[in-house]
Image (cartoon, rainbow, N blue to C red):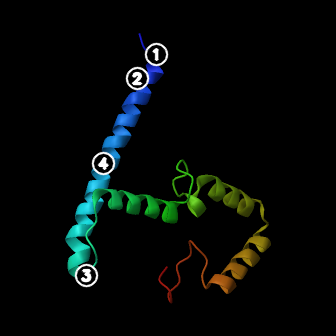
Amino acid sequence: MKPWWMWKLGKGLLFLAVGLTVFGAIVMTLWNALVPELFGGPLLSFWQAMGLLALSHILLRGWTPWRHGHGWRDHRWKQKFEEKLAAMAPEEREQFKEEWKRRCGYYPGEETKETGR
């Protein structure tokens, strides 16, 4: 009898292979339907579409496959920032907000009439 983790690994690899195949076919179909007509570009084969998919993943998300693009939106960063703001005295907090407005033009969380943000 096989250990449970081998069964789980096999199912995961099968799911990954099917998902990549379907996603690659979608990319190839969309590219071949739009790019040649709109821009006069070349048609893509399936493997070229897979390469384009891998390249876009590297360029847009980075090298690490387990980090899913949280970046500045990462919960830990936001939590640390809020704790730092909460620890500030009211005068320090207002000074920080004014500095933020001076550098960026607005402070997040406050709506301004000019920007509408």
- Give the image quarter of residue 43: bottom left
Tag 2–tag 1 contact (CB < 8 Å): yes
Element type where label 2 sits in the image: helix
Residue at (40, 35) in percent of width and height: 13
Numbered badge on residue 7: 2
Amino acid carrying label 4: it is: Thr
Q: Earlier in the sequence, mark 3 or mark 4?
A: 4
Amino acid carrying label 1: it is: Pro
Element type where label 1 sits in the image: loop
Numbered badge on residue 40: 3
Rendered position, 26 above or below 91: above
Q: Residue 113's x, y, as percent?
A: 50, 87
Which residue position holds label 4? 21
Q: Earlier in the sequence, mark 4 or mark 1?
A: 1
Rendered position, 7 above or below 104: above
- Give the image quarter of residue 104: bottom right
Q: Nearer the viewer, residue 85 or 64?
A: 64
Q: Can you say which quadrant of the picture contains the N terminus?
A: top left
Q: Earlier in the sequence, mark 3 or mark 2?
A: 2
For the residues labelled 3 and 1, the Cα–Cα distance comes to 53 Å
Which residue position holds label 1? 3
Q: Residue 66's x, y, as percent?
A: 54, 47
Q: Select label 3 or label 1 by which is in front.
A: 3
Q: Earlier in the sequence, mark 2 or mark 4?
A: 2
For the residues labelled 2 and 4, the Cα–Cα distance comes to 21 Å
For the residues labelled 4 and 1, the Cα–Cα distance comes to 28 Å
